Image (cartoon, helix red, strand yellow):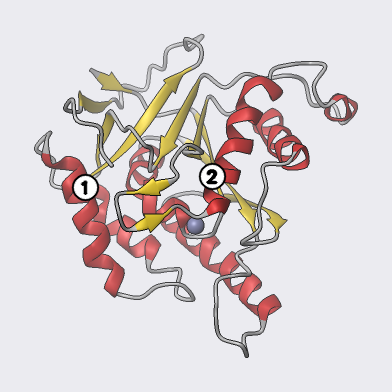
Amino acid sequence: MTILPPKHLLVIAAHPDDIEFGAAGTIALWTAAGARVTFCMVTDGGAGSNKPETDLPGLIRQRQEEQCAAAAILGVQDVRFLGYKDGVLQPTLELRRDLTRVIREIKPDRVMIQDPTMFFAGNYYINHPDHRAAGEAAAYAVFPSAGTRPIFPELLAEGLEPFDPSQMWLMFAVTSETVIDITPHIDQKIEALLCHKSQLGPEVVDMVKGWDRESGKAQGYAYAESFHVMILKEEEQPQTTGTGVSLKPAGDEPKA
Ligand SMILES: [Zn+2]
């Protein structure tokens, strides 16, 4: 089975650095194949320090710069910041409308989001509530809000007509059946991750490489990222770029 790169991918995530952890290799693969990619960061990242003396407005600016630098390494020029407060995000109608606005503006055929159903990861991590809130609002922006005319009439007043993305990809999903070989792009992924200097250092390299080795193990890939993919409608026009990505279905066991 072959998975084609998207024409235009929209990635929605709660915090600067979330995308680099979960999907940077796949994004680098697709931009190299000619895909356009937009990042939409929901929160301002302003809870990314526990030091009492932290200059929080300065931290927010720094995290935006770090995210733009990471995006550039992955071939992504369009990075948007919605500016919601970090750490207390809720899946409100306001957030859903803001995400619907982005979808109707850029008309992505594929949207990548965080899995709102991921509550715990294994026995060691309580998933950050912002990740679940961003994922829930994003999923409901994809459907039904982006494609339904009477929802958010204020967007029609802005000239934004309904639009339905074809596919929704979930990162760090409860069940990930779709495995993407990112071996040629692992160095790019690590370089992008390390742009987030305010949040992480070289100690993450072994951890993330370990995750990605594990993700590729069953298929024999040195490094891979895995996703849960939802096909919401068939593509109207198949792509003719010939830059397919080899895809093998994952094993039966759902990945934690
Ligand atoms: Zn996060």
Instruction: Residue at 22%, 27% (x, y): give it.
Output: 246
The numbered disc on residue 76 is none
- How far apart, in angstroms, are the residues tagged by discs 1 and 2? 30 Å
Residue 133: quadrant of the picture: top right
Q: Is residue 113 above or below residue 128?
A: above
Instruction: Residue at 48%, 12% (x, y): give it.
Output: 235
Q: Amino acid at mark 1?
A: Pro
| Percent coordinates x, y for residue 136 in the rendering | 59, 37
Element at label 1: helix
In the image, farthest residue toward the bottom: 53
| Percent coordinates x, y for residue 120 in the rendering | 40, 48
Q: Quadrant where the C terminus lies?
A: top left
Q: Is residue 39 above or below residue 69?
A: above
Q: Nearer the viewer, residue 170 or 103?
A: 170
Q: Amino acid at mark 2?
A: Arg
Residue under circle 1? 184
Instruction: Residue at 23%, 17% (x, y): give it.
Output: 1
Taking 108 as reference, is 211 left or right?
A: left
Residue 157: quadrant of the picture: top right
| Percent coordinates x, y for residue 222 in the rendering | 13, 47
The numbered disc on residue 132 is 2
